[in-house]
């Protein structure tokens, strides 16, 4: 049984969200004149926010098990943490811009949800936004549906 | 007279938002194995962000009177601040997860808007998002229509 | 060539965003009893976040050239920085509330995008949100389409 | 009776601190070529942190009554909030740099402590640091003894 | 071998610091009229910052092993996390103000350092500051020598 | 003429500080088993805070010209920004831990002050603290005298 909501008005958005955060420290370089000095090998701390969306909560009033959400985010980030993204097989030949890495993590998390790794609660998740802060004054995100 | 906007394109979102923040310090406990150690009586500081949405501003270029918005948020939070949520009549038998408390505060603020407590400007508010930060790396929110 | 995405489900939002930040320090005053002490000449530091939206990335995996985005945001903010907004020709007779200044900056940035000042990548931008933080516990934003 | 501490080693610092925050929104201008565009009338939000120091806590394990600390900080800030510092009698002819305003607030808070406005606990305060954040990337402070 | 520094001038402070953060979510109540509504059972998220001080770095240019520092901070916090501090044997009959809990964690961490739990690098630590943020606008700390 | 202060009590600290912030994005790797996965080539965004100390302000009520302070911090950071620290001649064979990089930047800024690059005001600076945030929950600093 899901938490009962009033009949939604057409077009009105009713949405719960739950966000968990973690971070990775990576090296990488970019190809293309538009990147200027960032064409050189450099690096970044990406503070990563995974925001799960669902229109309802479960009987325990949870959107998703926050422990499982943290564990899965960590598992996904472990594939990149303390590495040079230029050498990552899954990212070969791709410019790993902040917006692209957000998309990449989004893809991995959606796969985890589909595999049932977020437990029963994961079935209720309808959307996911992944946001990466690369510095105090720049960040990028990708948001897309789940399911 | 409301601030004139160009004819909106179909499906395009044009929206103002105004956010005010406050916080509460509460005790509570959860029921259910999935909560692990959080089944024990513990507590949280919830930093609360109330984000009011409206497609237009009033003649004074206000979305809503920020003083009234602060006062109403405070009035709603006072019903829970410095308390044990397990003992709150309005929350008896409910797991007061961060996502649920966001929903609860949303419900109380929407009621306040409907009662006219945000003044004339409150009539323009079409949506509300309530976000609660429970720690530096976890937060939850509920967003829904007003009116 | 844009980054290939799966066929979107009807109504599902798939969106990249890139945000750059800067700030301005301005004086101003408000007209209207509802503003209370803010009717007096005072001021604010506005921390400004410009969030560009696009459904796809370009071949370099960029939403928009971040260097150009910073430059344009700075150019727009220079028209107001270290000034008294009450004396700004473009803002004469207007209450420069945080929500209105967000709208004003939004308008100037959209014009810059239309003039091609964000380069080729700017053509992909479909939406823009401008958020201004006026204090640690209050902020306002305007979001609208580009193009 | 104060909280018992071990005999301090020579030169070793043992210190409690308690910090409360608030903010003001002011207009001002500077005189002197070195200020560049800041010679024009502009403004700032100052997020103000008042950090009280004491080597011991009282019997209730308080450094100072946090409610009184907030009230006194607010009372001091009310003398400047929503004003043009150029017109403040207490600041006439002074360049109200962030470092100077920190010093000014420090002076007013020390006077309040000496007048007993922080209650009995205020007698234990031996030092005070006042820090003002003027933007996300610049702040200034003044620290000095009390008593 | 420690990193060589120039002969220090008399009274001049030369100090490295390394800070690691974590948090706890606790319930508690206070005794004493001065606490007002906080006499009721309520709770707090304490964001905890442990700042280790040393005048020199080791040969690997480390102040202290950051992994061990995190582990020990976590181990200390686990004694309190998800609990009601009113029931903690080590805190019975004590008002667990933020400043006192900072002192308590400081005591536990100093003991851990003395037991050699921070490894060889821990021997170089000469001071420790523990800071607890209880809300966005209030925090407290205790700083004292180690050794 | 410097801002007049009351006769200081013996041992009492009276100090102004001014802090400016910037950031760098670097790659690097560590040598030594204690570094675990950080022995691999990875990277970091270092948010850098340079805190200048002086016991008095100048006639314009400035600790130091904030524009020059920003420029010098940027000039120093440019020697490292968007680079692999493992290849930096000035850092060859050194483990570029966060605490060491803070010390390195400190050394370069002190040299700049001694060369008069902060102008006349720089002569008043008696101390400098450089703090580097490597992630949301870890940072390191070095503080030492200037002059």
Image (cartoon, coloured by chain):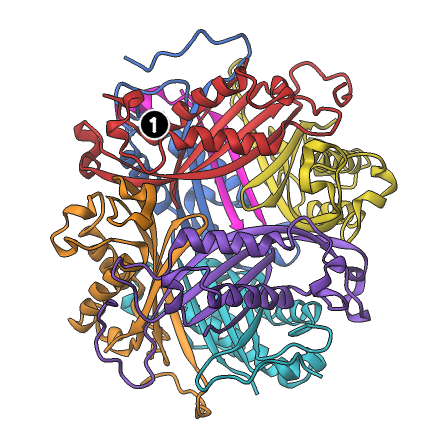
Chain colours: A orange, B cyan, C purple, D yellow, E blue, F red
The residue at 37%/67% (across/down) is A18
Image quadrant in which the N terminus of chain C is located? bottom left
Q: Residues within 10 Å of mark 1 (few under 14, many from 20)?
A: many
**Residue found farthest to the left:** A89
* Quarter of the image that includes the C terminus of chain C: bottom left
The answer to whether any part of residue E27 appears in the image is no
Q: Residues in magenta?
A: E119-147
Q: In this rendering, would C59 be left or right of F80?
A: left
Above or below — where is A67 with respect to D58? below
Q: Position of residue E107 (x, y in %)?
A: 43, 32
Query: Vertically, is C38 above or below A62?
Result: above
- For numbered disc 1, what is the local secondary structure? helix
Q: Is residue E146 part of the magenta span, yes or no?
A: yes
Q: Residue at x 42, y 71 (%)?
A: B99
Q: Residue D31: within the magenta?
A: no
Q: Nearer the viewer, residue E111 or F98?
A: F98
Residue that label 1 marks: E113
Location of residue F105 by image quarter: top left
- From this viewpoint, is residue F26 visible? yes
**Which residue, as the protein is rendered here, is positioned at the far right?**
D89
Give the side of residue A125 with respect to residue E21, left or right.
left
Residue F28: x and y in percent read 25, 34
- How many numbered marks, from 0 up? 1
Q: Position of residue E29 (x, y in %)?
A: 54, 54
Q: Say left or right for B82 vs B100.
A: right
Q: Is residue A118 above or below residue D121?
A: below
């Amino acid at each position: 049984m899901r938490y009962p909501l009033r009949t939604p008005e057409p077009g009105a958005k009713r949405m719960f969200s739950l966000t968990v955060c973690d971070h990775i420290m990576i090296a990488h370089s970019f190809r293309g004149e538009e990147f200027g000095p960032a064409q050189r090998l450099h690096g970044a701390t990406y503070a990563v926010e995974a925001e799960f969306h669902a229109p309802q909560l479960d009987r325990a009033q949870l959107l998703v098990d926050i422990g499982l959400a943290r564990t899965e985010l960590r598992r996904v980030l472990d594939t990149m943490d303390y590495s040079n993204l230029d050498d990552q097989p899954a990212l070969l030949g791709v410019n790993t811009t902040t917006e692209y890495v957000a998309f990449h993590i989004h893809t991995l998390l959606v796969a985890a949800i589909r595999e049932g790794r977020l437990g029963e609660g994961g079935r209720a998740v309808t959307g996911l936004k992944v946001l990466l802060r690369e510095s105090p004054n720049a960040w990028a995100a990708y948001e897309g549906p789940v399911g």
